[in-house]
Amino acid sequence: MSLNPVLLKYFIKLDYRDKDKNTFRKFIGISVSYLISNTFLSLYYYMNFDSMSFAVLSFTFNSFLIVFISMGEYPQLFFAKEQFEIINILPLGLNAFIKSKFISALLYLLTFVLILSLPQSVFFFFFDGNFLSVIAFLLMNLSFTFFLVSVLLIIYSFALKFFSEKATVILFIIQLLFFALIMYSTSIGSRTAELHTDTLMNSKLVNYSPQKFFALGIYEFSYLTAAFFIVLISLYLFLKTLSVYFLEIFETLYFIKPKERKIRKLRIFDAYSDFISDKLVKDNVEKAGYILSKNIITGSKSVLLRYLPLAAAPLIIALIGIITGNESLTFISSSISGNGIPILSPSITMIIIMMSRLFISNLQIADENSNDIQWIYESLPLKSPARIFQGSFKFIYYIFIILPVLLITAMLLIKFAAEVVLINIIYVLIFSSFVMTITFLFIKNYPFTMESTKMNSALRLFDILISVVFAVVIFILQFIIFENYTYIFISIIIIFIINFLIIKQIRNYDCTGKRITADRNKTA
């Protein structure tokens, strides 16, 4: 059966619907936030790069954001169990459901690609003032994003169909490699800007990247035509994959549970986790939050995948840099005076800073398979419900940030001077802790209580955008601060004191932002 317009309209309405009554306001707020954040990032690209490099960086950044949301929301975007079970009993046909869901998903993703591309297109116009070039830039921007999304989702779809037992592992590998590659590509831009050159085309990785191919479509009609055919073919193949294997993938996602296997617990990890719980978690309330986070995150593959790929990415980059001898993946020289302290590679720094914000934001998102637990928090007689979150905060910080950083430190100490490695690591950890604290100020939900909807995923996409801005700013500051050790120690002490004062103040408020009264302080 052909596409059903009524069904398509129904799916489009559901895509922008949330349990909250202020869904439209939330969408407008997200859109404005995207525009403002991406405007600053686009301005940075415009001031430091030529038009071709600007296009490559814009394509890379947009694809990273959209792939993140499309892979994270793959089941809801293209299958939607509740919707399918209702519509499947109607005489509409399976193909009508698949095509309608496919197009509604593409339109949903297109909305955010267009919002992200708008400020980029404006700045691209300033390069030569040619409207046709701007239109070509926008078209190639959209084409590359949907090409990459369709290719990665085809791979994941085949993994679910033919390797259902290993699908989670395959998804982890795809995300890990993708994050590492994107962050490395972005770091090339940061290093290029600080070296006072305006082109990325000196990099072999950039010259042989698909972004470069699509960027050539802005200036050459033959490349533009080829890019259109490539993206149409990739989208068609993805639709064909869904059409052929829809029911099998649907069963894998929602009904077939992996065979239970005895998981070998790493004694070292358990000992490390227990040490943190015993020595660094202050009281029973914080410990409850710590243990809750540990059980939910390690007990759910879908929740664990929100953390593990990104946490492993800087480890992979550091390991590759040490094995291959590519020092640009580990340390780079200061570019202001040339005599400063070597700086930890932006490929590593930027990911750690991003982790600091994203991981705390992800703490709010509930496990898809868990029931509503909001009422549990509200019924507990706690003097400060925020203390639960502080326990969860500590689990994330010490397990998914401190632990990878310790492993990176151990690897770097094998090859580089101890004082250089340690001062860089301390700098990154202090600033990552500060970013986590700032993020914590804006948290309004208890851990694992925010419904995993497409609209909330859009909020997570905004978190990525803000995280990248944070990472770029902190990395640029590092070029100034790492001129000498005095600057470094002063900046570390200042940030540490500010961070300490903010955390101390947070303890006097609950998760709703209300100050704790004396009566409430008497409650255990």
Image (spheres, grey):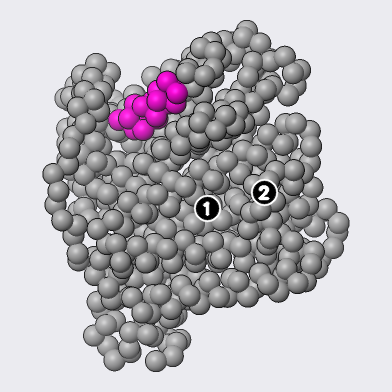
Question: Which residue is depicted at the point 59% across and 50% down?
Answer: 61
The residue that label 1 is drawn on is 65
Q: Look at the image and say whether residue 410 sits in the magenta stretch.
A: yes
Residue 337 location, x and y as percent?
Answer: 76, 17
Snapshot quadrant of residue 253: bottom left
Looking at the rendering, the stretch of residues picked out in magenta corresponds to 395-411
Taking depth in this image into account, of 326 and 4 the one nearest to the observer is: 326
Is residue 439 placed above or below 202 in the rendered structure? above
Residue 36 location, x and y as percent?
Answer: 63, 48
Q: Amino acid at mark 2?
A: Val
| Label 2 vs 1, first from the N-terminus | 1
In the visual, does 380 lie left or right of 67? left
Q: Look at the image and say whether residue 334 sits in the magenta stretch.
A: no
Taking depth in this image into account, of 243 and 82 the one nearest to the observer is: 243
Q: Is residue 434 visible?
A: no
Q: Which mark is residue 206?
A: 2
In the visual, does 159 lie left or right of 500? left
Residue 29 location, x and y as percent?
Answer: 53, 53
Snapshot quadrant of residue 139: bottom right
- Helix, strand or loop status at disc 1: helix
- Helix, strand or loop status at disc 2: helix
Nearer to us of marks 2 and 1 is 2
Disc 2/disc 1 C-alpha distance (Å): 19 Å
Residue 177 location, x and y as percent?
Answer: 47, 47
In the visual, does 228 lie left or right of 29? right
Residue furthest top as drawn: 486
Quadrant of the image containing the C terminus: top left
Is the Cβ of the residue at disc 2 closer than 8 Å to that at disc 1?
A: no
Residue count near mark 2 (Cα–Cα under 10 Å), binned few <14, some 14–19, many ≥20 = some
Question: Which residue is depicted at the point 74% across and 47% down?
Answer: 201
Q: Amino acid at mark 1?
A: Leu
